[in-house]
Image (cartoon, rainbow, N blue to C red):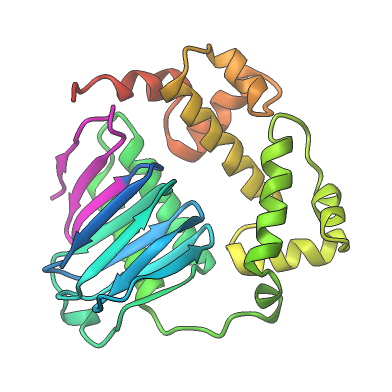
Amino acid sequence: MVERARNSRRAHVSAIVTELGELTLLPARGYEARYTPDRALVGFAFDGQVGRHAFASDRERPFRTRPNSVAYTPAGCDVFSSSAQGGEYLVLRLAADEAAAAVRQFNDRAGMRAVRAAEALRRLILQEAAAEPLEIDAQARAFVDAVIGAPTEEPREARWMTARRFERIQQVIEARLHAPLPVAELAEALQLSPGFLSRAFKAAIGVGPHEYVLNQRIARARRLLADSRLGAAEIAVACGFSSQAHLTTQMRRRLGVTPAAYRRALYEFPP
């Protein structure tokens, strides 16, 4: 049985308890945290993040994670992490560590299975109506299996997508998020063919450029729904959607909620 616990939506934090452990969706905002988990943590970063961290050491090091990256932290590992901007993050605190006892701490790119399972879990968490407990448990199991399964060698095309090159692409996306953005324009920014860029991008990020841009449009729409008084139609235009109906369709399909329901839920539970 899945028990539910939802914290303040104004704080953008939501959690559910599955048969595998507590699953929490953390907001895209700055943070600083120091902790020693008593259970293993399996995490998924929907957004790229930049900051400083330390694992089982007092030595802090800078980090830069790609969007759609995964992490595993074993129980008892001292952790420090901070980021001025942060990013939306899904973390599962495992109820038992036996199956993953031999896995050491790591951060890595996510495969397609992990991406799809994480997206499904986010959608289930954000839905206002109670989701089917068996579906939540199944997606949580798929997520854990995908993250702590046997590591695979990074594809050659993924190694080409360096942090600097991805940052350049991200700059183009941010500047053009309100308007149509063909893959050819992204490829031109790095003087590549659209075909090669698409392959390298998907190998590194886990999704193709078109899907990534759509996710960024939805992420901006969520920020505007939370932090502005703009109407849904104005937000749709600001985020590059053809209409309010288009925004509504994409949010319902990817997050399980409409813009109106998402905004309403932000203030449904007082802080």
Residue 18 makes an appearance in the image: yes
Residue 43 picture location, percent across and down = 34, 62
Residue at 28 percent of width and 75 percent of height: 55
Q: Magenta span covers which residues?
A: 1-25
Q: Is residue 202 or residue 28 the one in the foreground? A: 28
Residue 139 picture location, percent across and down = 34, 57
How many numbered marks, from 0 up?
0
Against 69, residue 145 (above or below) is: below
Against 41, residue 213 (above or below) is: above
Residue at 28 percent of width and 39 percent of height: 131
Q: In this view, does 245 lie to the left or right of 179?
A: left
Residue at 63 percent of width and 41 percent of height: 214
Q: Which of the 4 image quadrants contains residue 124?
A: top left
Q: Is residue 185 left or right of residue 45?
A: right
Quarter of the figure that contains the C terminus: top left
Residue 200 picture location, percent across and down = 72, 68
Residue 261 picture location, percent across and down = 39, 21
Most extreme residue toward the bottom is 102
Residue at 50 percent of width and 24 percent of height: 224
Against 64, residue 101 (above or below) is: below
Most extreme residue toward the front is 59
User: Is residue 5 covered in magenta?
Assistant: yes
Q: In this view, does 173 lie to the left or right of 105?
A: right
User: Is residue 161 covered in magenta?
Assistant: no
Residue 142 makes an appearance in the image: no
Against 234, residue 39 (above or below) is: below
Q: Is residue 181 or residue 259 the one in the foreground? A: 181
